[in-house]
Amino acid sequence: MNKKTIALLLAFSAPVLAVAQTITAPTLKEGDTWTYVDTVETGPTGFRQTHDAITVQRVTDSHIYIASKQAGSPSEGPEVIVDADWSRTREISGSEVVVNKPLAFPLQAGKTWKVQYTEPHPSGNVKLSSATWTTKYKVVGYEDIQVPAGKFRALKIEAEGDWRGELAPTNTVVQAAQTQPGQTTLITQARRVTPEATAGSTYKAFWYAPEVGRWVKSVEEYYGSNGVRSQRFSSELESYKVGGS
């Protein structure tokens, strides 16, 4: 086989190797820290921004124990347990249920996964008797992204989903007075409003940089039944320290 043939084979095989590349879970250590600028937008006018630091306290085979606090605060925040792939769980009806799974190692372009769960009175919303959330994730591919911590070649994970809920039944009471000569009668009428279905949609995106061990940017958006965005949560990496660096 001559050199020209070998060169052609390498040229054609390089893109295949790039596409087939997989990213395994990072090896995190106690003291690894990421600081983000976190922004919460609610409705057309609500806006809140904080600078938050996340620090690894310890790591086991299945979980990461982290502490979160506002950057610069002398006091440590509460310690939280997340899954080894940074999945968030919530206790629903006595069981721990995955509610957000931004990463599913090993990561590879084209990989997909789904998270679905049902909870009563989601997030303390007494207007909803229950809601079912379905989110489908997909690894889109690499993008160059600029955040306060610098420029990164990051793997983008995108997720679209929907939520379907049922408005809790309510009781309304109507009172009226009937007046006759020498007599007033108070009439009370109770009416029960039957449950109604409602729905909305969600959008999420995460940009994961292997050298950082976590995403460098994230966006989570929530839309109501009218298609209008009700909330948007975004985070951008400001600084990080991993692997004892």
Image (cartoon, helix red, strand yellow):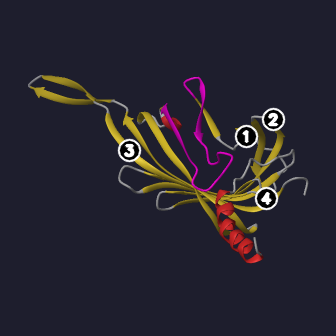
Q: Position of residue 11 (x, y in %)?
A: 69, 72
**Left or right of 207 on screen, residue 198:** left
Q: Is residue 139 above or below residue 119?
A: below
Query: Does the magenta run of residues contain 94?
Result: yes
Residue at the spot x=28%, y=30% of the render? 194
Q: Is residue 82 above or below residue 102?
A: above
Q: CA distance from mark 2 to mark 1?
A: 8 Å
Q: Amino acid at mark 2?
A: Thr
Task: Assess whether mark 4 and mark 1 are in contact (beta carbons under 8 angstroms).
Answer: no
The residue tagged with tag 4: helix, strand or loop? loop
The span picked out in magenta is: 92-119
Q: Amino acid at mark 3?
A: Ala
Q: Earlier in the sequence, mark 2 or mark 1?
A: 2
Query: Does the magenta run of residues contain 82?
Result: no
Q: Give the residue number, with chain letter if any, for mark 2.
A: 60
**Left or right of 97 on screen, residue 58:** right
Name the quarter where the C terminus is drawn.
Answer: bottom right
Q: Give the residue number, with chain letter if any, for mark 4.
A: 211
